[in-house]
């Protein structure tokens, strides 16, 4: 099982979000090249779950064409941190938009 999300990317548009429901889980926002720009989660305090969280990201301020992918997961806090650690291990830094907000304490993944 891969640590990274392996679901296919979908366009981050109102039409692209039509099939997303209000579940708990994690998500990634990426550019049209598949580079991860942000890793987030929809938790118990998220209004309308994954759909609500993704709607907050509609219309990238830099004008980039953005995409998203989701994973429904009730252990969203642990999974969010795991995705952040995996990204940092692979790329040497957190995704660009995650660097703009407070980051939870993260461990390091052992090589495997």
Image: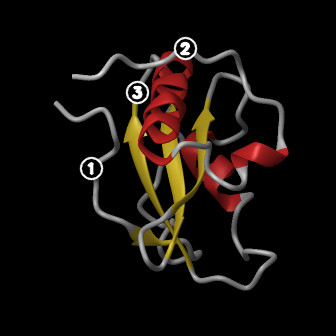
Helix, strand or loop for disc 1: loop
Task: Give the residue at mark 2.
Answer: 107
Count of marks placed on residues: 3
Q: Where is residue 106 in the image (x, y as percent from the top left)?
A: 61, 18
Which of the two labelled residues, at mark 3 and mark 1, occupies the earlier sequence position?
1
Helix, strand or loop for disc 2: loop
| 110 relative position to 106: left or right | left
Which of the numbered marks, if any, corresponds to residue 97? none
Which of the numbered marks, if any, corresponds to residue 6? 1
Task: Give the residue at mark 3.
Answer: 73
Q: Distance between the residues labelled 2 and 3?
A: 20 Å
| 7 relative position to 37: left or right | left
Helix, strand or loop for disc 3: loop
Q: Please give the name of the residue rendered at 51% of the width and 51% of the height, measured from the top-left corner.
A: 28
Quarter of the rendering occupied by the C terminus? top left
Q: Please give the name of the residue rendered at 70% of the width and 62% of the height, measured from the top-left corner.
A: 57
């Amino acid at each position: 099982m891969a640590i990274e999300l392996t679901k296919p990317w979908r366009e981050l548009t109102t039409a692209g979000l039509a099939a997303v429901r209000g579940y708990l889980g994690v998500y990634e926002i990426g550019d049209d090249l598949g580079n991860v720009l942000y890793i987030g989660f929809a938790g118990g305090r998220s209004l309308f779950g994954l759909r609500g969280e993704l709607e907050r990201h509609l219309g990238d301020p830099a004008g980039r064409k953005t995409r998203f992918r989701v994973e429904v997961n009730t252990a969203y806090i642990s999974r969010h941190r795991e995705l952040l650690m995996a990204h940092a291990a692979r790329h040497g830094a957190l995704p660009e938009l995650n660097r703009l907000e407070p980051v939870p304490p993260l461990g390091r993944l052992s090589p495997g």
